[in-house]
Image (spheres, rainbow, N blue to C red):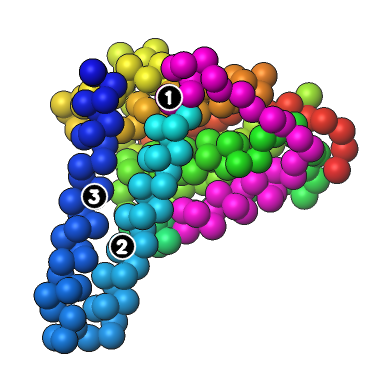
Amino acid sequence: GHFMANIAHEFRTPLSALAASIELLLVELDNLTRSEIQDLTNTLYLGILNLETLIDNLLEGASIETGNFRVFPAASGVREIITSSYQVMAPLLRKYEQNLVIDLPDELPYVGADKRRIVQVVVNLLSNASRYAPSETEIRLSARVLPDWVEVSVSDQGPGIPQAYRDKLFSGSLLTRIEDGLMKKGAGLGLSVVNAIVKAHGGEVGMRDHQGGGSVFWFTIPIIGEQ
């Protein structure tokens, strides 16, 4: 029941926001300028992208809980994964006026990745960074090559995460709101899915403090030969 109640909450807010925007469009259509209509439509689009991410997380969360969760890694390009993730998140980052910097080495080996799911991991990390980072700050999406692994990281200039909560970050037990406003509801579900997907690839996930404030969330995926 606890899980279902949380899920109901997860959906209520984004659906209410979508309904309000559509209602405004319907009622005011004749009085709205073209650019106002465009803004509203863009907001609807962003809301739907968010819901898609949420639904992906819930489906993964359910299959993880029932033990039906499997990944199918194949040789994948890191650049391609990062580009796909950026394309999903770009409208949201633009809306919040956050500056995404992509920082990749010239040479990147192939990794063994279930591409759709690793894109989901990166989208989740970008989505969380966007949620906590103030507007006009930098969110950095980076990759670096380690022996046998590629580490992908997302760093933000948000408020950072208090020490007391860090152990629980990736366990899914953070579904309840942390009252001081540092963790918004929903971050825990995404991170528990991130953890499960990366672990299923044989990789690791973690977070560290960002120099100058904020957080860096990182994960590793195994290299499978040179690109």
Q: What span is colored magenta in the figure?
A: 61-90
What residue is at 34 percent from the left and 32 percent from the top?
A: 187
Position of the N terminus, as image quadrant, is: top left
In terms of sequence position, does the residue under pointer 1 or pointer 3 come before the other? 3
Residue 107 seen in the figure = yes
Image location of residue 23, percent across then percent down: 15, 66
Name the amino acid type tagged 1. Answer: Ala
> Dot 3, how many residues are within 10 Å of its Cα: few (below 14), some (14-19), or many (20+)?
some
What residue is at 32 percent from the left and 55 percent from the top?
A: 47
Membership of 89 in magenta stretch: yes
* Corner quadrant of residue 6: top left
Residue picked out by circle 2: 44
Q: Are marks 1 and 2 in contact (CB under 8 Å)?
A: no
Image location of residue 33, percent across then percent down: 22, 86
Residue picked out by circle 3: 15
Q: What label does residue 132 carry, if any?
A: none
> Dot 2, how many residues are within 10 Å of its Cα: few (below 14), some (14-19), or many (20+)?
some
Residue picked out by circle 1: 62
Q: In the image, is residue 164 above or below residue 30? A: above
* Corner quadrant of residue 74: top right
In terms of sequence position, does the residue under pointer 1 or pointer 2 come before the other? 2
Depth check: 46 or 71 in front?
Answer: 71
Dominant secondary structure (helix, strand or loop) of the stretch shown in magenta: helix
